[in-house]
Amino acid sequence: MIKRLTIGDLRFTLSCARITQVTGVNSECADGHHILMWDFDYTSLEEVKAALKIVQTRYFLSDIIILQTRELESFNAWCFTAVPWHRAVEIVAATKGVDWGFFRYSVWRYHFTLRTTPKNGRDSHVVARLEGYELPTAKIEDLKYWVEYETRKG
C-alpha cells in the first residue's frame, strides 16, 4: 500500500509492505568485471530457456544455470562469464522477458543482485543448465560483495 499527499510543491509518501530479510550476492568480481545474472517473473521455463539460449549463442557465453525461485514461473539465472559492466548491461538488456524492475534497479546501482538464501521458507533450486560455448571466466569465490537486504514477502 502506498499513500501520497501533496501540499504545494512537497509530496509526502507513506508505504506499508510485509518484508523479510534475505542474503544475496552482487555481480561484481574483485577485478571489477561482472558475472551475468537474470531475474524472470511470470515466464515459463521454456520461455526462459529460449531467451537465454539466444543471448548465450550471440555472446558466446559459458554455461547458464537456471534456478526456480517460486512454484510458478519465477526463475533466476547465473552465468560465470565475467565481462565489463557496460557489456553485462547490454547482454541482460538483450534478453527477452527479463524482469524490468530487476534490470532498472541493477543499472541504477551498477551491479546485479540475486538472493541466495530461502525466502518465506522457499529454497531456490536448479531446474536447468544450458551448455555454454566457452569456459567460465569467474568463480563464486571471485564475487566481491555478499549482502543482507530486505525484500517484500511473497
Image: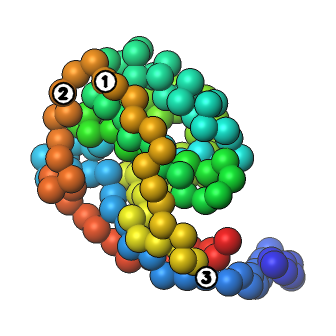
Q: Amino acid at mark 3?
A: Ile
* Residue 104 seen: no
Q: Which residue lies under the disc numbered 3?
A: 19
Mark 2 secondary-structure assignment: loop
Residue 13 falls left or right of residue 94: right
The reply to whether callout 2 and callout 1 are in contact (CB within 8 Å) is yes
Q: Which residue lies under the disc numbered 1?
A: 132
Q: Which residue lies under the disc numbered 2?
A: 135
* Disc 2 from disc 1: Cα separation: 7 Å
Q: Is residue 12 above or below residue 46?
A: below
| Residue at the image position 63 percent from the left and 30 percent from the top | 47
At label 2, counting other C-alpha atoms closer than 10 Å, the crowd grade (few under 14, some 14-19, many 20 or more) is few
Residue 27 falls left or right of residue 121: left
Q: Looking at the rendering, in which quadrant would you find the C terminus?
A: bottom right
At label 1, counting other C-alpha atoms closer than 10 Å, the crowd grade (few under 14, some 14-19, many 20 or more) is some
Q: Amino acid at mark 2?
A: Leu
Mark 3 secondary-structure assignment: strand
Camera-near label (3 vs 1) is 1
Q: Looking at the rendering, in which quadrant would you find the N terminus?
A: bottom right
At label 3, counting other C-alpha atoms closer than 10 Å, the crowd grade (few under 14, some 14-19, many 20 or more) is few
